[in-house]
Image (spheres, helix red, strand yellow):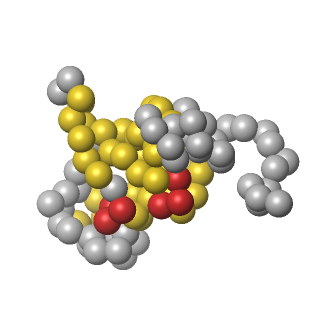
Amino acid sequence: MLADRVLAVQPPLEGERRSRSGILIPATAEVSRRLSWADVVAIGPHVRTIRVGDRILYNADDRFEIEVQGEDYIILRERDVHAVASDRGDSDTGLYL
């Protein structure tokens, strides 16, 4: 990976889901302006806050999709990631001072 790029893989879709009120939403329904989760598999040398193995929250409009040896991946810039979920016990706030 180059610069501030993040390579991630999206977990397979679970298929149909239900809303809180019990309405069945088919897997093919397009949900606009919804953020998605993905698992980081590689990072570029200038990525500062994301580590391999982290789970990231991103906007689907900001991604590039690629296929490598039959596997589907997405590429994002670090600045396009909205949140990071990790098991790290850092007390770091993530601020750049």
Q: Residue furthest left?
A: 28
In the image, what residue occupies the spot 53% across and 60% down? 79
Q: Position of residue 51 (x, y in %)?
A: 60, 37
Q: Please state which of residues 42 and 89 is positioned toward the viewer in this rendering.
A: 42
Q: Residue furthest top?
A: 69
Image check: 33 left or right of 72?
right
Residue 40 visible, this orientation = no
> Tag count in the figure?
0
In the image, what residue occupies the spot 41% across and 40% down? 8
Q: Position of residue 23 (x, y in %)?
A: 26, 72
Q: Position of residue 74 (x, y in %)?
A: 33, 45
In the image, what residue occupies the spot 24% across and 41% down? 66
Image check: 20 left or right of 67?
right
Image check: 58 left or right of 26?
right
Task: Name the image quarter holding residue 22.
Answer: bottom left
Q: What is the quadrant of the N terminus in the image?
A: top left
Task: Name the image quarter holding residue 25.
Answer: bottom left
Q: Residue furthest front?
A: 3
| Residue 90 position (above or below residue 36) | above
Q: Please state which of residues 24 and 53 is positioned toward the viewer in this rendering.
A: 53
Q: What is the quadrant of the C terminus in the image?
A: bottom right
Q: Position of residue 48 (x, y in %)?
A: 65, 45
Residue 68 visible, this orientation = yes
In the image, what residue occupies the spot 15% across and 60% down? 28
Q: Please state which of residues 47 and 82 is positioned toward the viewer in this rendering.
A: 47
| Residue 57 position (above or below residue 46) | below
Q: Please state which of residues 49 and 27 is positioned toward the viewer in this rendering.
A: 49
